[in-house]
């Protein structure tokens, strides 16, 4: 288990994604999220501006752009950002989640399998930054591997594995949200192991 510290990110996890960027991108997305992405986009106005938070190799940003949405891709890994930039044909913003300073800039935030790398003592603060970055009525989607614990996988990536109750509590503590939904699905991750996923959706209050 990870000891608490004041660092709002895990350096080893960022180092993994920089070192393994090409292999990670080649392996593809195994999290069974395509249906969730479609449902998320169906709830947005045409041409809505979406922040793809933790955009990885850019596959989800590409799908959103092809569907006619304005997308700002952002990732903490410069290696993955370079790959995504080539895929998307435009620069990808390189920043950690604790560096997000946007205010009412986005209609929606898509954070698939990214916030799960945020240490537990920092997650409420990061969700508050997302809340601030959304316009009133803006929609958040975030997915986490479930488990009610934290630790590292066999690749030394830090993970925050919340329970449903923990995820709901973090959302409640991070700002005024409405229409909060928490769902579950099965899938796997980069390591190929079967995984149960939790999905948080919420609207920033007007």
Image (cartoon, rainbow, N blue to C red):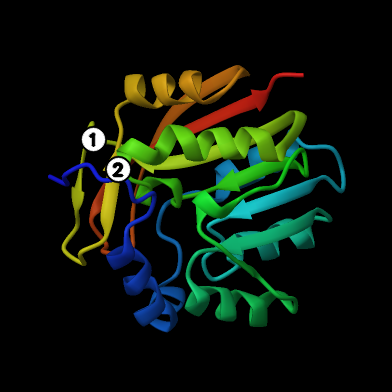
Of callouts 1 and 2, the N-terminal one: 1
Q: Quadrant of residue 85?
A: bottom right
The residue indicated by pointer 1 is 147
Q: Which of marks 1 and 2 is in front?
A: 2
Q: Position of residue 42 (x, y in %)?
A: 74, 38
Viewer-proximal residue, 165 or 123? Answer: 123
Q: In which quarter of the image is residue 179?
A: top right
Crowd class of label 1 (few under 14; some 14 to 19; many from 20; radius 10 Å):
some
User: In what element is the residue under mark 1?
Assistant: loop
| Residue appearing at x 54%, y 63% in the figure | 75
Q: Which residue lies furthest to the left in this view?
A: 1
| Residue appearing at x 78%, y 62% in the figure | 66
The residue indicated by pointer 2 is 160
Q: Is residue 150 left or right of residue 110?
A: left
| Residue appearing at x 28%, y 66% in the figure | 12
| Residue appearing at x 56%, y 20% in the figure | 180
Q: Is residue 114 above or below residue 185?
A: below
User: In what element is the residue under mark 2?
Assistant: strand
Q: Is residue 177 above or below residue 184?
A: above
Q: On the rendered image, what quadrant is the N terminus found in?
A: top left
User: Marks 1 and 2, Cα distance to the nearest angstrom?
Assistant: 8 Å
Q: In this view, does 19 lie above or below 30?
A: below
Determine whether label 1 and label 2 are within 8 Å by CB: no
Q: In this view, does 46 lie above or below 91?
A: above
Q: Where is residue 59 in the image (x, y as percent from the top left)?
A: 59, 66
Q: Position of residue 78 (x, y in %)?
A: 51, 76
């Amino acid at each position: 288990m990870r000891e608490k510290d004041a660092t709002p990110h895990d350096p080893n996890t960022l180092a993994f994604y920089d070192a393994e960027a090409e292999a990670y991108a080649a392996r593809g997305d195994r999290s069974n999220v395509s249906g969730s992405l479609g449902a998320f986009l169906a709830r947005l106005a045409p041409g809505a501006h979406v922040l793809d938070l933790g955009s990885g190799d850019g596959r989800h940003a590409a799908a959103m752009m092809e569907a006619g949405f304005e997308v700002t891709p952002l990732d903490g890994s410069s290696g993955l950002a370079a790959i995504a930039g080539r895929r998307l044909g435009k620069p990808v913003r390189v920043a950690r989640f604790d560096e997000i300073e946007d205010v009412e800039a986005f209609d929606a935030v898509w954070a698939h399998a990214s916030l799960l790398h945020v240490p537990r003592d920092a997650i409420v603060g990061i969700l508050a930054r997302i809340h601030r970055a959304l316009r009133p009525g803006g929609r958040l989607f975030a997915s986490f591997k479930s488990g009610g614990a934290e630790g590292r996988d066999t690749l030394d990536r830090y993970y925050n594995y919340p329970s449903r109750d923990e995820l709901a509590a973090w959302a409640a503590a991070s700002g005024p949200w409405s229409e909060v939904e928490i769902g579950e699905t099965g899938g796997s991750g980069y390591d190929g192991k079967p995984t149960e996923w939790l999905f948080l959706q919420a609207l920033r209050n007007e």
